[in-house]
Amino acid sequence: MKVLKNFIALHSIVITIHLLFFSKQLSMTNMQIDPKSDEPPPRKASYADAYNPHTFQNVGHRIIDMVSKYLGRATGRAADLPVYPPVTPDMLLREWGPLSNAKGGTPDDFFAMMERFLMQCNHLHSPKYMGHQNAVPLPLSVFSDMISSLLNNCAAVFDMGPVETVVEKRIVDWMCEKIGFKSGGGFLTSGGTLGNFTALLAARQVMGMRYGFDVWKEGLEEHTNLAILTSDQSHYSIRRPMQMMGLGKESVVIVPTNKDFQVTRDAVERSYAEAVAQGKQVIAFAASSCNTGPGTFDDLVMLSEFCRAKGLWLHVDAAHGGPALLSPKYRHFLKGIEHADSVVWDFHKMMMVPGLATAVLFREHKDSYQAMRQDAEYLYANRPDIEADWYTLCKRTLECTKISMGVKFYSMMSLYGEEFFANHVTDAFDLAQWFADRTRNDPELELGVEPQSNIVCFRYVPHARTMDDLNALQSQIRAAVVESGRFYIVQTTLPTGVYLRLSLMNPLTNKEDLEQLIVAVKAAGIKLTKPKTALPSVRAKEKSGACAAARRTR
Ligand SMILES: Cc1ncc(COP(=O)(O)O)c(C=O)c1O
């Protein structure tokens, strides 16, 4: 209790110091929407002002200078730039006042506001950002995004976004080739969550038709027993669609995983048999390549054989790990993906471009039209020849105003080539392997699971801690490390307890950064565990296999 009180007091002091120290940086602008201000508006902008290309050019030059300087600070590991700014939700809510108080301003004010915005963000370009699975965007990709935002062409139908439609097809064809889909096809959509939803909608329709009913036309009627199988580690965007489709929680049959967080053939067979015995009509297995928490890959060769034997749809959520297909060293993790019926693959995770951009790919091109078979005569004529209608994307995606999302990747591939992206995957996965070795050889650290991707889970394991203390300690270490402003990391809960979790997304992160992180984690751990309690040591037991036993009994 005393330790906890000291911890809370210490952290309050740290936050206050940070807020005081960085408050200048955080409010170095004039264009604040002041909740109390009742000043008259400074001026009204004319349309001609708002669309003036000279203003765009002038402000644009200043913005480029500002962002370039920022990039230098962020990528250069500047000590005065906290990776995660010292902010709290309430503090920011107060500072960014109600929009109804907006009075208008000058381009200078706009510039200042954007500078303030920049400084209050989480700085992914810092090599010490090791948190979530967001790409650290290639700076030049932002220009492609800027141009497509200005043009605001959308790629729902060809006329609305002619170039984007074609760019998308080229990207989709390239991805199908990488997967090994010979007659594949697909489209881009806004994020892996939407991608998984769309793929599972298609699975439901195709499988329904195979079993003799048409959900699109007739609704579910008596077919409310449809179910999918998925591992206990799959992303929530696999489970959510089934409930959104009105099929209820029971429609997602969770298959338990082994110590590597992968499903085994035995476990899959058992879960399938149990589901069938309960009267469920299983339509698909949704595999993870890789899963989100521990970052391990399901065995797609085994799962594709299982799905073929049972006549099920195989969906592969490769939102994070799909790009491993580019890496000669790591593509073996995706062996068997060529047999999948559908695949989701994100660009805004391991493909170094900003969000959102996700490919939804189908082994059979025609299946990409199954998720929705909406008539919209004002947008497109219903041509029966699917192949001839590849350029009408709104027939396949849930989106209508579908932003132009392909050009940022197409342009970066043109600029840097495929090998550049392949190397990014190999380097990031290699770095995770190095960190795992480093952790394994350190008696004060423990690895959560052998990493297969660029996601690593580990924890600080001092002497004389109970398992509950150990779990609480990881959260406290994480908070202390993030509050220090020197690193951004996250945490996750595995069946064996709470772990610190790294996603090594930044190509500039190196071994030295990771060594420094270890020093910071240990320093925080030592501080937080003083004075030592007289509780029995679980450390020795864990190392001798208690941890492995805990995993086995899950
Ligand atoms: C394995 C996996 N699938 C899907 C998603 C969801 O993707 P998005 O954030 O693009 O919606 C995530 C997000 O982290 C993920 O890790």
Image (tube, rainbow, N blue to C red):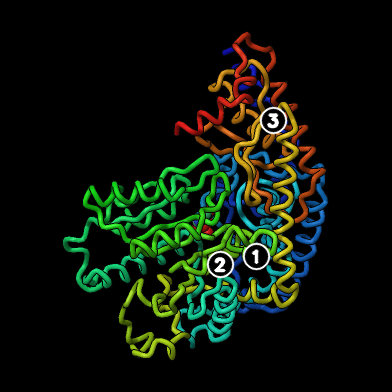
Mark 2 and mark 1: Cα distance apart in space: 8 Å
Label 3 CB sits under 8 Å from any ligand 1 atom: no
Q: Which residue is mark 2?
A: 357
Closer mark to the observer between disc 2 and disc 3: 3
Q: Are marks 2 and 1 in contact (CB under 8 Å)?
A: yes
Q: Residues within 10 Å of mark 1 (few under 14, many from 20)?
A: many
Side of 112 where 269 appears, left or right: left
Q: Position of residue 188 (x, y in %)?
A: 51, 72
The relative height of residue 168 versus residue 283 in the rendered view (above or below) is below
Seen at 64% across and 17% down, the residue is 6
Q: Which mark is residue 445?
A: 3
Seen at 75% across and 45% down, the residue is 434
Amino acid beneath label 2: Ala
Q: Position of residue 426 (x, y in %)?
A: 71, 58
Q: Residues within 10 Å of mark 2 (few under 14, many from 20)?
A: many
Quarter of the picture containing the N terminus is top right
Image-quadrant location for residue 332? bottom right
Tell me the SS state at disc 1. Answer: loop
Q: Residues within 10 Å of mark 3 (few under 14, many from 20)?
A: some
